[in-house]
Amino acid sequence: MTKADVVKARLIELFNLCNAGRYSKVTSYVRPGAEESTCSLVKRNTKKGYSFGKFMTQTDSYGEILIWEVYYRDADRRGEIWAFRLLNGKYVLIDIDPIRDPDK
């Protein structure tokens, strides 16, 4: 499995746990204290489904960041960028940003 596949699998697991209301199981996927807000966002935006866009990597002073674009069907937002970093042997969500129009 590639890093892209591993992060995508973790993202799907995170979405499934949030949509099932299993917030206590989400702790290994997100930063401490972000479980409820992350799951609230997931439940609101993935109700009618989602699809994956591009996979990207970036590097900063702390190391590699693995990023998936996620597009929502019938949500208030067009989509978001979900960024993960390897922490303690697991890829953990570190940031969620809206996908911006290229013209803006």
Image: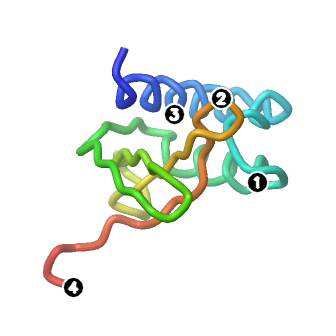
* Earlier-in-chain disc, 2 versus 1: 1
Amino acid bearing label 3: Leu
Task: Give the image quarter of residue 37.
Answer: bottom right
Which badge, 3 or 1, is on the more N-terminal residue? Answer: 3
Q: Single out the residue that lies furthest toward the left.
A: 103
Amino acid bearing label 2? Gly
Q: Nearer the viewer, mark 3 or mark 2?
A: 2
| Residue marked by disc 3 | 11
Q: Nearer the viewer, residue 81 or 5?
A: 5
Write down the residue under mark 1: 34
Instruction: Kindly report the distance in space between the C-alpha atoms of the residues bearing marks 2 and 1.
Output: 19 Å
**Foreground label between 4 and 2:** 2
Q: Residue 62 location in percent, x, y?
A: 56, 58
- 85 shown above or below 89: below
Location of mark 4 (residue): 104
At horizontal 42% and vertical 30% (from top left) the residue drawn is: 8
| Circle nearer the N terminus (3, 4) | 3
Quadrant location, the N terminus: top left
Checking the image for residue 8, the label placed there is none
Residue shown at 45%/49% (left/top)? 64
Marks 4 and 1, how far apart at CA: 29 Å
